[in-house]
Image (cartoon, helix red, strand yellow):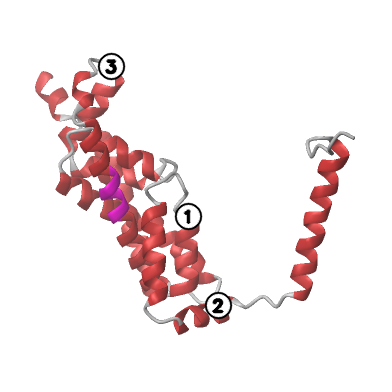
Amino acid sequence: MAPLRLSSGPARWFVLAAVLLALVVLALTVPVPTPLELRDRVAALGAWAPMAFLLVHTVAATTPVPRTAFSLSAGLLFGPWTGLTLCLVASVVSAAAGFAISRRLGGRAVERLGPGRVRMLEERLSSRGLLAVVSARFVPFIPFAPLNYTFGVTSVRWRHYLVGTAIGLVPGTSAVVLLGDAATGSVSPSMLAVFVVSGTLGVIGVALCARTPAADTAEEA
């Protein structure tokens, strides 16, 4: 007798229906804590909770795992300010790790790749330094971990990379952390002000980076 294949139509629908039924039963029978109750339970764990979150977030951010889930969770579990601090520290540490690994393994390989888009990217990053890093971090759809490794094979300086990463991550991270905090029914006005100010500065930075010609281009002109 041949074994039942889950890839077949009836079997696949049966498994899907069983999973949905199990989820419905769990939702109806298992008490789900409210966001405030969940935050209180995490607070009861003491310093271990933020330390564990920081460690897991730092490790996960070195992989293609999206940071959004961690930022939402941080706002929900720890509140706006603690949540933002944890996310920024974890992100900067993981960004530094990715940058160091890439620079150690890849060296300055980009400089030997010849003309083309790669060299243009290298010139743009090396000439604009801090501003280029900030503007790149401000773009939400650029994957975080791959960008870390990409920066590692350019001539961007460490201080420009770290400072630019920290500054560029503030607007987007604070927005998502605020969204997670809003699930508890309250939003910090001061945190909202930080998001508005940092977001405005980020937009200005992107505009300046787009309008300012690279150093090499300006000299050739």
Q: Secondary structure at mark 2?
A: helix
Residue 218 in sight from this viewpoint: yes
Quadrant assignment for the C terminus: top left
The disc label shown at residue 38, or none = 2
List the single residue furthest toward the front.
1
Tell me the CA gap for discs 3 and 2: 52 Å
- Residue 191 visible from this viewpoint: no
Q: Nearer the viewer, residue 23 or 8?
A: 8
Q: Which one is earlier in the sequence, the residue at label 1 or at label 3?
A: 1
Q: Where residue 153 appears, x then y in whole percent?
A: 24, 33
Circle 2 residues within 10 Å: few <14, some 14–19, many ≥20: some
Q: Main structural element of the magenta stretch: helix, strand or loop?
A: helix
The amino acid beneath tag 2 is Leu
Magenta extent: 92-98
Q: Position of residue 23 (x, y in %)?
A: 75, 62
Left or right for 220, reference 72: left
Q: Residue at x 40, y 68 (%)?
A: 52
- In the rendered structure, which amino acid carries the disc numbered 1? Thr
SS state under label 3: loop
Residue holding disc 1: 68
Sequence-earlier tag: 3 or 2? 2
Q: CA distance from mark 1 to mark 3?
A: 33 Å
State yes or no: residue 176 in magenta: no
Mark 3 and mark 1 in contact (Cβ < 8 Å)? no
Percent x, y of residue 209:
25, 38
Instruction: Inspect the image, locate mark 3, and give the three-letter code of the amino acid beneath it.
Output: Gly
Residue 103 in the image, given as x and y percentages of width and height: 22, 37
Q: Mark 3 — residue?
A: 116
